[in-house]
Image (spheres, rainbow, N blue to C red):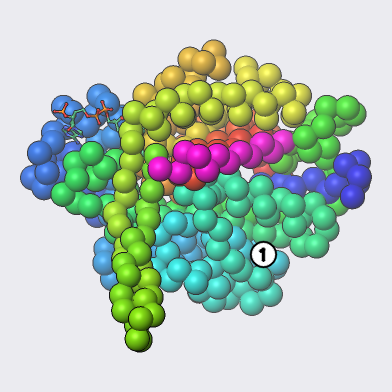
Amino acid sequence: MPSDSLPTVRLVGIGAALPNPCLHNDDLSQIVETSDEWIWPRTGIRERRILPPQLSVVDLASQAATQALAQAQVHPQELDLILLATSTSADRFGSAPQVQAALGATRAVAFDLTAACTGFVFAVATATQFLQTGLYRRALVVAADVLSRTVDWTDRTTCVLFGDGAGAVVLEADTAGRSEVGTRASMPQVQQGILSIELRSDGTGSELLSLGMETEARPLVGSLEVGQYRCRPITMNGREVYKFAVNAVPEIIEKSLFRAGISAEAVQGYFVHQANQRILDAIAKRLEVDPERVASVLERYGNTSGASVPIALADWIEKGRFGPGDLGVMVGFGAGLTWGSIVFRWGK
Ligand code: ACO
């Protein structure tokens, strides 16, 4: 489809869900040898939320989705597509159809997408393609993760970083307004909705962050062996992830801004994956933007993996710091390695 016939894809509603139980750094010091004095200056995290065992990723995702649909004034049955970005689903066959059922979104096709902390950005990019081709009109993208269920609570190098949460956005194709996603050639006067998308992967760095399975060989019958999976907790090379993030993220933000024809100063809000405050500060410095424009909810929620970008966006929208007509950049980075940046103008 030629770019001048692409429908505009607007972000029209947002929601977030954070479970109530709160785990403070001081609580963690009773579990592992750590302290608020160690965690806070290195990460910007003071507390994180923990999903109670009787609740699931689907409950958390559905709560965020319900809020986003209400804000967008979209009925669940008006949805054509639901994407659930998660790395911590209880059912590895996928949980998005359970979210569809919980919402009563009977017309929507629903499937999971896994790209760790970049999952939300990749899912928004994927949904945008369905809407731009004209196949679908309305999509819901939910990112939900419960890393508390996957960390080793005896490993102080990882368990202090993560928290649970979900965030969701509703996207709508507007065939009346046309956009020029990713082209500078003939930009419309006021660009709306999704303005540019840049995505990357580099599997050579897959060892830096992993939520893997071990394969154990077991005899099955006669001399035939079969492999059996056993879940491993998160492993991370923190220093290398830091180096990757502070190099790759500013570069991809600059590329996406260039494609959209927008300067870094024109952006009201940068919604960057909430891994670590030092990473957010380094990115602001590299881009030469006011750190106040880089959203941070790390202090209250820690690293909520794929959910962190929509949680940060929802927080700013709720506080009135970001609103209809504002220009934003959402950026994910993490395991895979994967990273991506989307420039957008918020609202209908
Ligand atoms: N409490 C107290 N001491 C700790 C803790 C802790 N929670 N964790 C590690 N230490 C100790 C280590 O054992 C080590 O002690 P030693 O010198 O006696 O061996 C010392 O502190 C330094 O350990 P490092 O791992 O080198 O700590 P570093 O200064 O690199 O900080 C951190 C760790 C904050 C994770 C840092 O590497 C970082 O900012 N990484 C960026 C990546 C990131 O934030 N990842 C989050 C998830 S990934 C993602 O979302 C994409």
Left or right for 296, reference 97:
left
x 76%, y 24%: residue: 261
How many marks the image carries: the answer is: 1
x 72%, y 24%: residue: 258
Q: What's the amino acid at mark 1?
A: Leu
Whole-percent x, y for residue 265 in the image = 62, 17
Of residues 88 and 9, which is closer to you in this image? 88
Q: Does the magenta segment cover residue 258?
A: no
Q: Where the C terminus falls, by quadrant?
A: top right
Q: Residue furthest bottom?
A: 221
- In the image, the segment drawn in magenta is 196-207
Residue 35 visible in the displayed image: yes
x 79%, y 38%: residue: 181
The CB of the residue at mark 1 lies under 8 Å from ligand 1: no
Q: Does the magenta segment cover residue 197?
A: yes
Whole-percent x, y for residue 255 in the image = 67, 26
For disc 1, the marked residue is 81
- Note whether 335 is above or below 214 in the view shown: above
Whole-percent x, y for residue 85 in the image = 52, 56
* Classed neighbour count for the residue bearing mark 1: other residues with Cα under 10 Å, few (<14), some (14–19), many (≥20): many
- Note whether 190 is above or below 233 in the view shown: above
- Note whether 5 is above or below 322 in the view shown: below
Q: Quadrant of residue 186?
A: top right
Secondary structure beneath label 1: strand
Residue 311 visible in the displayed image: no
Q: Quadrant of residue 276?
A: top left
Indicate the quadrant of ligand 1 in the picture.
top left
